[in-house]
């Protein structure tokens, strides 16, 4: 557990009812022991909270319903283990200091981070130097290598009618070839585009949210311009508060960034290094309420008006619409009790192919309905951006460009599936 001073421990309000913010729990090995890492997707603090296995179950009790003493009592009753005095307070203090609990510490950290993000000259590439090279020349070499190894038929490159793409957003180490098979057929459409709209999965996004930013996205080659008229049309439809309530998610969310790097590379290859089209990035929140019931995403009038505004502000332009979207997430790494062996993966591929066939029809309602039949049992994180992109494309047909299954743990029991699709 992160170290905290005794003074800070004493600041824990014994009458408060702590509630944990949305985090990404991951088990990691630390000094020879398994620890639960509570990763903050917003990266509001440099502090890292690692919980020993014996106290990790305390996390499940941070629902905003219990005081610190109530948390201690519930833990001891539920797990039959007595906790030494001060353990719960130290645990809560560590979470407070890391801004992982809702409350004043979190709010202050969030406001500082958002102010810094908006004051920056652009949205810098968050994964540069980690997920891919920060050096422009090295990045060019990497993508060129993926392109050379992809084996795309040259005849497929001459398709100026292409209007949209589904691209992966998995890391390049696992999905590089699939990115190339997706983006290379779009080279002519990329070269001709005068506006690009990218819908990306917001892995920490609220249900149904469409989250905008007025910041320009940048890659190691520099920033893209943004079309403020399109953005402001969407803001007018969604409302200022709703449109930017989760804007800070743009800072570290990788889905749009990884697509933008390939877009920028192709534009440079097409001779448009100094003539970049505006880029409108839109993060798409969870669809859980729509796959676990009959609710319609467009029942919210603001979302329907946002789609209308997007069509109105882009009418008559050469728009490339991109859904940055992975498919299934299966296996123990994602909560399944069993691993996915060869036979299970063959069944998964057949399921994904049926889903892609529906996506190819261009009908967003049918695409959602297909995943609703089993309550999105395979955790298709790309559902929201694909759904919204299909609405923006408005009746186009798709063709699958490639498909792959990528390992998600060292045991080969967990998998993420990805695909590319072109819409004309």
Image (cartoon, rainbow, N blue to C red):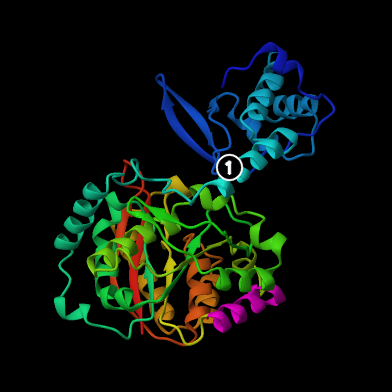
Query: Residue lying farthest right?
Result: 15
Magenta region: 297-313
Looking at the image, how many numbered discs can be counted on the residues? 1
Quadrant in which residue 61 is drawn:
top right
What secondary structure is the stretch in magenta mostly built from? helix
Q: Quadrant of the N terminus?
A: top right
Q: Quadrant of the C terminus?
A: bottom left
Say what secondary structure mark 1 lies in: helix
Q: Residue at x 58, y 29 (%)?
A: 56
In the visual, does 366 lie left or right of 359? right
Q: Position of residue 205 (x, y in %)?
A: 59, 55
Q: Is residue 307 magenta?
A: yes
- Where 358 sits versus 239, above or below? below
Query: Foreground residue, 183 or 190?
Result: 190
- Where 177 sits versus 233, above or below? above
Q: Residue at x 79, y 39 (%)?
A: 65
Quadrant in which residue 67 is drawn:
top right
Query: Foreground residue, 75 or 66?
Result: 66
Q: Is residue 398 magenta?
A: no
């Amino acid at each position: 557990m992160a170290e905290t001073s005794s003074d800070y421990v004493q600041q824990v309000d014994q009458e408060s009812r702590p509630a944990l913010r949305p985090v990404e729990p991951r088990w990691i090995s630390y000094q020879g022991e398994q620890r639960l890492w509570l990763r903050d997707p917003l990266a509001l603090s440099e502090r890292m909270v690692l919980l020993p296995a014996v106290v990790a179950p305390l996390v499940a009790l941070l629902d905003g319903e219990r005081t610190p003493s109530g948390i201690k009592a519930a833990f001891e009753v539920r797990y039959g283990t007595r906790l030494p005095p001060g353990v719960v307070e130290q645990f809560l203090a560590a979470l407070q200091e890391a801004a992982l609990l809702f409350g004043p510490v979190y709010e202050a950290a969030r406001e500082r981070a958002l102010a810094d993000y908006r004051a920056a000259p652009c949205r810098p590439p968050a994964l540069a130097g980690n997920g891919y090279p920060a050096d422009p020349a090295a990045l060019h070499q990497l993508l060129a290598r993926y392109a050379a190894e992809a084996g795309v038929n040259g005849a497929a490159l001459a398709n100026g009618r292409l209007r949209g793409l589904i691209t992966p957003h998995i890391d390049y180490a696992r999905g590089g070839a699939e990115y190339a098979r997706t983006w290379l057929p779009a080279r002519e459409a990329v070269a001709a585009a005068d506006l690009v709209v990218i819908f990306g999965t917001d892995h920490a996004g609220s249900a149904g949210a469409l989250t905008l930013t007025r910041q320009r996205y940048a890659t190691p080659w520099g920033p893209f311009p943004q079309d403020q008229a399109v953005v402001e049309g969407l803001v007018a439809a969604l409302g200022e508060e709703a449109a930017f309530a989760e804007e800070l998610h743009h800072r570290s969310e990788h889905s749009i960034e990884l697509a933008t790097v390939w877009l920028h590379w192709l534009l440079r290859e097409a001779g448009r290094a100094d003539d970049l089209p505006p880029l409108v990035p839109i993060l798409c929140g969870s669809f859980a309420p729509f796959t676990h019931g009959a609710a319609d995403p467009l029942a919210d009038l603001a979302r329907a008006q946002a789609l209308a505004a997007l069509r109105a502000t882009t009418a008559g332009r050469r728009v490339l619409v991109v859904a940055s979207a992975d498919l299934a997430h299966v296996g123990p790494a994602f909560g399944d009790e069993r691993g996915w062996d060869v036979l299970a993966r063959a069944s998964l591929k057949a399921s994904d192919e049926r889903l892609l066939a529906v996506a190819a029809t261009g009908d967003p309602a049918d695409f959602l309905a297909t995943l609703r039949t089993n309550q999105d049992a395979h955790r298709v994180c790309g559902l929201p951006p694909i759904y919204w992109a299909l609405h923006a494309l408005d009746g186009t047909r798709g063709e699958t460009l490639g498909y792959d299954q990528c390992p998600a743990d060292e045991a080969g029991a967990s998998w993420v599936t990805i695909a590319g699709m072109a819409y004309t």
